[in-house]
Amino acid sequence: MRNTTLCHIERDGKYLMMHRVKKTVDENKDKWIGIGGKFEEGESPEDCLLREVREETGLTLRSWQFRGIVTFVSDEWGTEYMHLFVSEDFCGEVRTDCDEGQLEWIDKQELLSKPIWEGDRIFLRLLYENAPFFSLKLRYVGDTLAEAVLDGKPLPLKKP
């Protein structure tokens, strides 16, 4: 099991997103995702958040909100507990080089038309609606979302 963070950094109705196109072995290959990564030994969610944002973007967060826990269960990648954050309060300049992917400010509504995980659409909707702190479980078989459970209650899935 892995613990990770993910932050949606917002400015002017846009999120700073990473297009994961640089690594050959990457569970997020070719997807657009927020900023984050794996915990290092001894880190709290906030420690990991601040380090990952600084390493990947060059930005320093001044404040943030812890919005939820997303449990990913995958038959290919194992289980991951992702600590989901948002922030509009940061300083610094976005770096132009990142070994993880390409950084770009994407309109929040346009993001839904980009290649993203189906389960990301669920937590993005919760962020857009300013839902209270939530626990979301997303179970994948391959790249297909097979189950979604919000705060212990199953969600209906769209049929392909």
Image: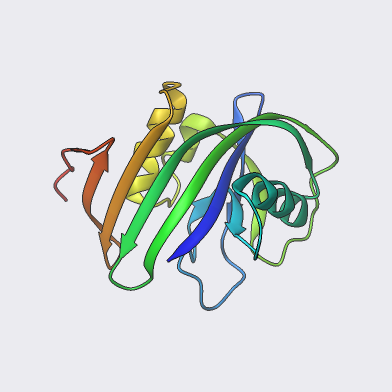
For the rendered model, the colour scheme is rainbow
Residue drawn at x 66%, y 52% as measured from the top left:
48
Question: In the rendering, at what x and y percent does residue 17 appear?
Answer: 60, 46
Question: In the rendering, at what x and y percent does residue 62 appear?
Answer: 77, 32
Q: Left or right: 66 with respect to 135? A: right
Residue drawn at x 41%, y 21% as measured from the top left:
129
- 56 up-or-down from 92: above or below: below
Q: Residue pushed farthest front?
A: 42
Residue drawn at x 42%, y 39% as measured from the top left:
112
In the picture, which quadrant includes the N terminus?
bottom left
- 153 up-or-down from 1: above or below: above
Residue drawn at x 66%, y 56% as measured from the top left:
43
Question: In the rendering, at what x and y percent does residue 145 appear?
Answer: 25, 54
Q: Residue pushed farthest right?
A: 92
Q: Left or right: 51 with respect to 124? A: right
Q: Quadrant of residue 91?
A: top right
Question: In the rendering, at what x and y percent does residue 83 appear?
Answer: 51, 46
Question: Considering depth in this image, is 142 or 151 the residue closer to the camera?
Answer: 151
Q: Left or right: 125 with respect to 45? A: left
How many discs mark residues in the rendered view?
0
Question: Considering depth in this image, is 52 or 110 the residue closer to the camera?
Answer: 52
Question: Considering depth in this image, is 82 or 30 the residue closer to the camera?
Answer: 82
- 70 up-or-down from 91: above or below: below
Q: Residue pushed farthest bottom?
A: 24
